[in-house]
Image: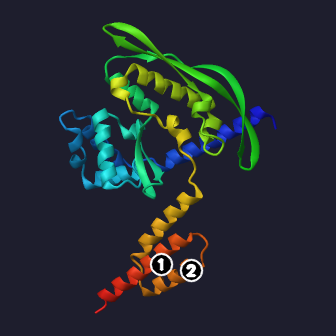
Amino acid sequence: MTETKKKKEELVVVKSQEKTLEKQSTPSEAEIKEIKVIERIIDNREIAPQDAFGKMSKSQIELVKRTVAKGASDDELRLFIQVCKGANLNPFLKQVFLVPRWDSREGREVRAIQVSIDGFRAIAEESGGYAGNEDAVFIGEEKVEYTANKEAKVVTAPLEAKVTVYKLVEGQRYPFTATARWTEYYPGVKMGFQWHIRPYLMLGKCAEALALRKGFPKQLSGMYIPEELDKGQVQETDEQKSQRGMSTLLTIISKCGVDELIEYKKKIGDTNKYNAMQKQDLLKAVENRFNEIDKETP
């Protein structure tokens, strides 16, 4: 099979998966009506950003949690809606995302707000000074080897991407150019799925985001698109997995009955999943739960 044919087959698979996900996430007519109400709340200039969450009904909040903010707590969702409102970004148009990330310091999953390249463009346009941009110009190429489905593969990737955006300043159109380099943004073979499928698109987005931030620093300072942060997101280490598993187990133990506690006490003693200190903490949690049950028993 030729390399060109392999790439075509990979793209067919990716597009098929995207269509399936899109079909599965298609909202009902009732949900579409609710989404329009939420969008009006975000668009309404008379509502302050900090008040937007309070303007939403319980059903609307649950809809947001089911669609664009899965797994979010009320506090995380409140902040997310406030940012959407303040930046006039529409999460249902994929201009902004609430992305789950593992926080090793807190030992739990948290959610970070990230703006898409479409969101960057919308913010720039909202400023009144955005005057378009040039297509990305790519410089140089290199072969990147990676493994997919236990098969060794090679993709041709650009060394650099350069994008120019334009801004109107006192009626004059000024260019702002930025360059993104593959070595600075490619997240590696384990995390680079989209980078292997669309290497030029991914690096081009990074360059455009850099140029937009350069041209519109007041509006975009401190904001980054997901593609710019991919390299900083490493796969969960064994230690992080252990911490996450332990956090979940501690929550379960706190709600167990006597029979379940006896079983967990034995399992904790036999397992090699946790180190000696973690086992000690888990066994202490079991004993504390036993004591709580004793106090609750008349």
- On the question of residue 156 being in view, the answer is yes
Total tally of numbered discs in the picture: 2
Which residue ends up furthest to the left in the rendered image?
46
**Would you place residue 246 above or below residue 136 in this image?**
below
**Would you place residue 287 above or below residue 88 in this image?**
below
Badge number at residue 269: 2
- On the question of residue 33 being in view, the answer is no
Q: Residue at horizontal 55%, vertical 83%? A: 266
Which residue ends up furthest to the bottom in the rendered image?
298
Three-letter amino acid code at the position of disc 1: Leu
Q: Residue 9 in the image: x percent, y percent? A: 71, 39
- Quarter of the image with the N terminus is top right
**Would you place residue 172 above or below residue 203 in this image?**
above
How many residues crowd mark 1 within 10 Å: few (<14), some (14–19), many (20+)?
Answer: many
How far apart are the alpha carbons under marks 1 and 2? 8 Å
* Residue at numbered disc 1: 283
Report the side of 150 relative to 25 (left or right).
Answer: right
Q: Residue 133 in the image: x percent, y percent? A: 47, 17
Q: Residue 3 in the image: x percent, y percent? A: 77, 34
**Would you place residue 98 above or below residue 211 in this image?**
below
Q: Quadrant of residue 119?
A: top left
Which element type, helix, strand or loop, lies under badge 2?
helix
Is mark 1 in CB contact (under 8 Å) with mark 2? yes
Q: Residue at horizontal 76%, vertical 35%? A: 5
